Amino acid sequence: MPLTTVKLYGELDSREAYIIRDFLKRSVVGYEWVILDGPEQLKERAPVKEDDVVKLPALVLPDGVILYDPSISEIASKLGWLLKPQLNEYDLSIYGAGPAGLSAAVYAASEGLRTIIIEREAIGGQAGTSSLIENYLGFPDGVSGAELAERARQQAVKFGAEILLIRNGVKAMYFNNKLHVELIDGSKVISRSNICATGVQYRKLNISNEDRFRNLGIFYGAGASEAPMCINYTVYVVGGGNSAGQAAIYFSAFAAKVIMVVRGSDLSSTLSSYLLSRIGKKKNITVLFNSEITALYGDIVLKEIEITDQKKNISKKYAAQKVFICIGGIPNTDWAKNTKIIRDNGGYFITGADLLINGIPAQWELERPPFYLETSVPGSFAAGDVRHNSVKRVASAVGEGAMAVTFVHKYLQETY
């Protein structure tokens, strides 16, 4: 994925423009964001042809081609990223291009396995939205999630791994000791083994008007591409974990004020010490404990929020136009609901010894016990945040991705 510079034109309060900016930012594509009041202004600022049907947002590619109100798939296609599977069968298919999936791809491809990695959105997963990861080994000055993911992508491609972006699996079935997956574009991927590294997605507030204001004031994750639009704003960050802490510190460099809305009574039990210390030193960061957002108000875009102090049972309205939700995750495992893979009550994949019931694996076909990261289906592994009882850290995800490849080798040797 070469570094590219594009120009994006759009209206300030545009859901579609935000989605494109977020994708470009996470994909490490250089872009210039030009705010317009309407489509008519585009004719004065861009090389619009007379017969063009002008719509916003508009993306001008390096070759001068203009895409009007494009989908992410259309952008990825024009940038040359939408590829088809090159092989009829793979040794290993990896689902999810976050830290765990990318790590697995690097180690598998470098060790000669025919490897394909499939990502439904942008490279990097949830970690790719992080503005700065400071506690990852080897980066004393920190590294953005997008940059770390892009470096890993380059490594995987160098060793021969195929990467398919903007792909959702439509149907997954296991038969003849292989995983058969039909993708949304009609292409098929058959593999002898697979690693699920689909990670998690941020939870919603589950209150009225939330979907109405999605990307129109309500954002999920750190929203790094939105930060330059937060100058002189009061920004709200919901959550008390590391992702919320990182987001609060990042936005504090742009916004006039950052308010963290935290359900708990302190941050020390949920936040890394270095983030806790920095938040305490930031004069424009305020933390509201025992609090939740309980209502959203506005017309086209978000204008106000209601915050309830659950301890005092007092609710109050605040003017708010930028709210970023970082409150834990829901595992992306729905694709497995029609398979024999066992999930826990939260939807996370159960692996290895956690599958044992009185020393006997539940729904297990082989005489040997399941490998450490192996699911209830032999040859199908899980790594990273999507796994039951995993440690929610980038370094842990990278380690599990590499470790899963070791077990993939063992499985392939005993099966084929």
Image (cartoon, grey):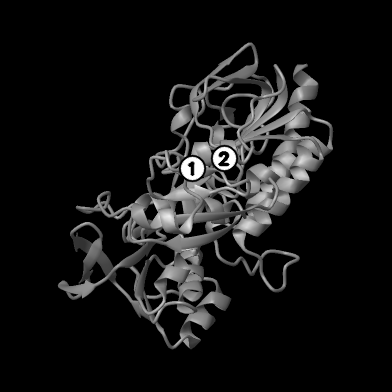
In the image, farthest residue toward the right: 111
In the image, farthest residue toward the top: 176
Label 1, on which residue?
67
- The answer to whether residue 32 shows anywhere in this view is yes
What's the residue type where badge 2 is placed?
Ala
- The image quarter containing residue 346 is top left
What's the residue type where badge 1 is placed?
Leu
In the image, 116: left or right of 36?
A: right
Secondary structure of the residue carrying tag 2 is helix
Image quarter (top left, top right, bottom left or bottom right) of the N terminus: top right
**Which mark is drawn over residue 183?**
none
Which mark is first along the chain, 2 or 1? Answer: 1
Where residue 142 appears, as percent x and y from the top left, is 66, 69
Closer-to-camera residue (178/36)? 36
Label 2, on which residue?
76
Where residue 245 appears, as percent x and y from the top left, is 48, 70
Closer-to-camera residue (357/180)? 180
